[in-house]
Image (tube, grey):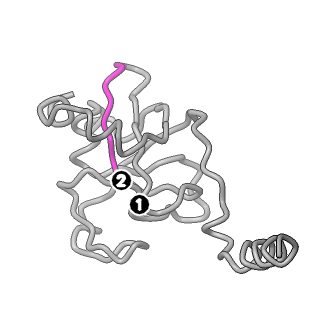
Amino acid sequence: MKCAAAALLILSIGAVPAMAQKKVTNMPTTGIASYYAQKFHGRKTASGEVFDNTAMTAAHNSLPLGTMIKVTNIRNNRWVVVKVTDRLHHANRRIVDLTQAAAKQLGFIHWGLTKVKVEVVTKEFVNSLPFWEMALN
């Protein structure tokens, strides 16, 4: 009986889609962030959601859609929590593309680009933040 259960477990693991098997690392990464142009407002994202430049969302190429990330502007230490809802263009060398609302919160809306640290956060972390801290940080 144990052998049959083990074989069934091995077979079921092989049936899980590759995207679901992808392991999300909690190691922070650093790189350059940019923000979406206004022309993308109202278009569909890779997740199927309609893009809203006033929301707190982002595009990232390797994290699963729906992942919550903390993006910290290394130049001024301001941070935001955003949800990954889209993908970057494959030729884009930046690590994250943010909404204009997130870029304003991070203080780089006038520069267009900034160096950031990206960290995956848990729902518990997001839920533990006071609303005013998320909105004003």
Q: Does the CB distance between marks 2 and 1 fall below 8 Å?
A: yes
In the rendered structure, find residue 83 and report the number of the disc placed on it: 2
Residue farthest to the left, as pictured: 132
Q: Could you tell whether 12 is left or right of 121 in the image?
A: right
* Residue 7 position in % (x across, y down): 84, 76
* Residue 102 position in % (x across, y down): 27, 43
Placement of the C terminus among the 4 image quadrants: top left
Could you say whether the residue bearing mark 1 is in a helix, strand or loop?
A: loop
Mark positioned earlier in the residue sequence (2 or 1): 1
Q: Is residue 85 above or below residue 95?
A: below
Q: Could you tell whether 27 is left or right of 127 in the image?
A: right
* Residue 21 position in % (x across, y down): 67, 64
Mark 1: amino acid: Gly
Residue stretch in magenta: 76-82
**Observer-nearest of 37 and 118:** 118
Mark 2: amino acid: Lys
* Residue 115 position in % (x across, y down): 47, 31
Q: Is residue 128 above or below residue 43?
A: above
Q: Is residue 3 magenta?
A: no
Which residue carries the number 1 mark? 66
